[in-house]
Amino acid sequence: MTAQPAYESAPDDPVEIMRILPEEFHAQFRDEYAVAVEGARHPEQYRRLQAMLRLWHLRALAYCDPGYAGRLAAAGDHTDSISARQLIPGWSDAGQRG
């Protein structure tokens, strides 16, 4: 019999996000997370917390990718016109990694 982990992390788990997120972004993530958690105390704002975690998961994947800085630099001043699919590996048309 092999030991099974008591907890299997989900991609949008804040602990998992912090694990893969470069340290330079930790403070910003923690600040935004604190605001989202406070808002999620109201049921009508719970989905905002989920969306915030999803966005930060995707950011973490992008920021830790070795080619991200080069792709961002290549985009130059036109970052508002480059698609997520071009910038973030695995980005699907639905805006989800896949």
Image (cartoon, helix red, strand yellow):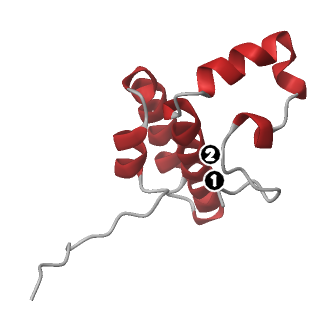
Bin the neighbour count of mark 1 within 10 Å (Cα to Cα): few under 14, some 14-19, many 20 and up: few
Q: Secondary structure at mark 2?
A: helix
Q: Are marks 2 and 1 in contact (CB under 8 Å)?
A: yes
Q: Amino acid at mark 1?
A: Ala
Question: Based on the displayed image, in which of its 4 quarters is residue 8 positioned?
Answer: bottom left
Q: Indicate the position of residue 75 as horizontal and vertical percent values.
A: 80, 18
Q: Which residue is mark 2?
A: 55
Q: Which residue is mark 1?
A: 51
The image shows a total of numbered marks equal to: 2
Residue at 59% across, 45% down:
58
Residue sticking out furthest to the top: 77
Q: Indicate the position of residue 70 as horizontal and vertical percent values.
A: 65, 18
Q: Amino acid at mark 2?
A: Leu
Residue at 66% across, 61% down:
98
Q: Secondary structure at mark 1?
A: helix
Report the Cα–Cα distance between label 2 and label 1.
6 Å
Residue at 47% across, 33% down:
29
